[in-house]
Image (cartoon, rainbow, N blue to C red):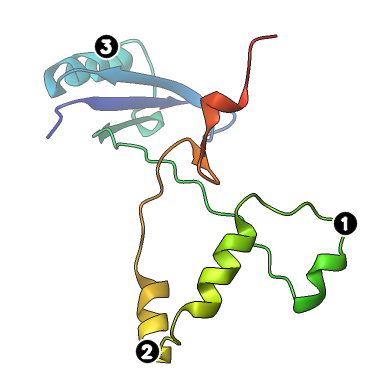
Amino acid sequence: MSNKVIVVVADLDNAAHGEINVLESPDEAAQLVETLIESGYDQARIRAFAADEFQISVYHRPVVALTTADAETTDEPELAGASEEADQEEDAPAVGAELAAALLKAEVAPEPFVRNGVRFSTQFGPA
């Protein structure tokens, strides 16, 4: 657990704006608050918060396009390997509704910086 403390001093005219100070220990925060009060700041404008840093995880969602059997007549380009996947799907046995629902609920962690099997950095070549 972190011992960092955030001290917020609100502006006089707008309490939604103010000065934010991030301090390493509660003792430093207490000294700052004492200094602010001695300097004439109203105690109601000063707030102190215990702070912990959160880890940020960014996930990219897949893009899904639903098509019908006559989708071959559309102007959209066909993805490489899509015809092979279609052949494999026709040979695959039918899956029960309960199993399909369970598979849809299962969370799969996407590989970061990858879309459609292509790594983001490989999509840009030298100029």
Name the kind of residue labelled 2 in the image: Glu
Q: Residue at x 50, y 43 (%)?
A: 117
Q: Position of residue 85 (x, y in %)?
A: 55, 64
Q: Which residue is mark 2?
A: 98
Does residue 115 appear left or right of residue 2 in this picture? right
Q: Is residue 39 left or right of residue 17?
A: left
How far separated are the C-alphas under marks 1 and 3? 69 Å
Q: Residues within 10 Å of mark 1 (few under 14, many from 20)?
A: few
Image quarter (top left, top right, bottom left or bottom right) of the C terminus = top right
Identify the element where label 3 is drawn.
helix
Q: Amino acid at mark 3?
A: Thr
Q: Nearer the viewer, mark 2 or mark 1?
A: 1
In this figure, which residue is indicated by the disc labeled 1?
A: 75
Are the two marked residues, 2 and 3, in contact with CB atoms closer than 8 angstroms?
no
Is 87 placed left or right of 47 in the picture? Answer: right
Secondary structure, mark 1, is loop
Residue topped by disc 3: 35
Residue 121, x across and y down, in percent = 53, 24
